[in-house]
Each structure stands twice: as C-alpha cells, then as structure tokens.
Amino acid sequence: MGLFPEFNEKKTIQNVRKFFSNEKRYPRICRNAWMDGIKSQVNDVTGIRGSRKGNGSEKMMIYYAECARAKQAVEKAISACSVGSQDILNWHHVKQLTVAETKLHINHHLGHSTFKDADEVACLEFAEACDRISTQMNCNLEILPLFLVIPMPGAHKKEITGKNQ
C-alpha cells in the first residue's frame, strides 16, 4: 500500500451517482437543511417544561442541524474539485439535468474527453474530497455516507465503505 490507498473506482462512482439521484439521500438532505437546522415552533427544547418523553423537538432540531452540516460538506467538496468537475456535479448531479442539457452548460471545459469520462473523473474527485471534508466536519455517516470503496488488505472480495447509498 502506497501513500494513497487504492480504491475501487467503479463502485465509488456508483456510490456518488446513487447519492445524488436517490430521493432519500441528497435531495432529502437539501429539504431538511433549510435555515441551518433551526426549525422549532416551540422555545423550549430542554425537555423540562411541558415536553413529551424523548423531546421530539430537540431531536428534530439536531437532525436538521446535521443535514445542514452535511449539505455544507457536499458544497465544500464540490468546490474542492476542478472547474470542469464542479460544472458536471452542479448541473448533472445536483440540479439533475440530463446529459444533453448538462453538455450545453459545460462544453467549454470538456476539451477532447467524452462526457462519460469527465463525469467519472468528477465523481472520483467528489468522493475523495467529500470523504475528507465530511470526516473533518464530523458529519453523521447515516446522513452523509463515505463514498470511497477501499479493498481490505488480504481479502479478495471484502471492501470497506460507508453505509449503503
């Protein structure tokens, strides 16, 4: 093993694509991240005065705050990628434009590479950046999973990754 661990590129790319396209992942994070996690109709979230057992308001505020942190980590990870990859990630994955629509916005960055190749590079850049940034920001892995699929040393089929996308 060298300075940088080898990872399964194909599965890593699949993880990134599933994350953005799965309605229960990135779109849900965006919906729940509004107002930086502050969403309470009640001033009391301490659980002391008139609150139910388990204090659902506090749990929801924490969840919204974690979604806001995950959204911020995704945005930072995208901004850490190359300009062409940022365009592909923003237009095709975040905004969910078709390949044809995305190409209209990014042709000046592709050069001689095909969209498929550029998309794969974008996914890999994002996976590396997002895993690092989400770890630094202490993001909840159930909300923002790790994307890199790293083969375990000495194992033929076992791999290390975050939760299923």
Image: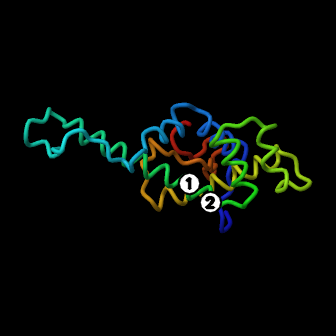
The quadrant in which residue 94 appears is top right
Residue 102 horizontal/vertical position (percent): 77, 42
- Left or right position of 48 against 152: left
| Residue plotted at (66% across, 42% down) | 93
Residue 135 horizontal/vertical position (percent): 48, 58
Question: Element at badge 1?
Answer: helix
| Residue plotted at (82% across, 56% down) | 109
Identify which residue, 1 or 43, lies in the foreground: 43
Residue at image mark 2: 79
How far, Cα to Cα, is label 2 from label 1? 6 Å
Residue at image mark 1: 75
Residue 17 horizontal/vertical position (percent): 66, 39
- Left or right position of 82 against 141: right
Whether tag 2 and tag 1 are in contact, CB under 8 A, the answer is yes
Q: What amino acid type should be assigned to the residue bearing mark 1? A: Glu
Q: Kindly give the residue lying farthest to the right in the view shown.
A: 112
Identify which residue, 39 or 145, lies in the foreground: 39
Q: What amino acid type should be assigned to the residue bearing mark 2? A: Ser
Identify which residue, 107 or 156, lies in the foreground: 107
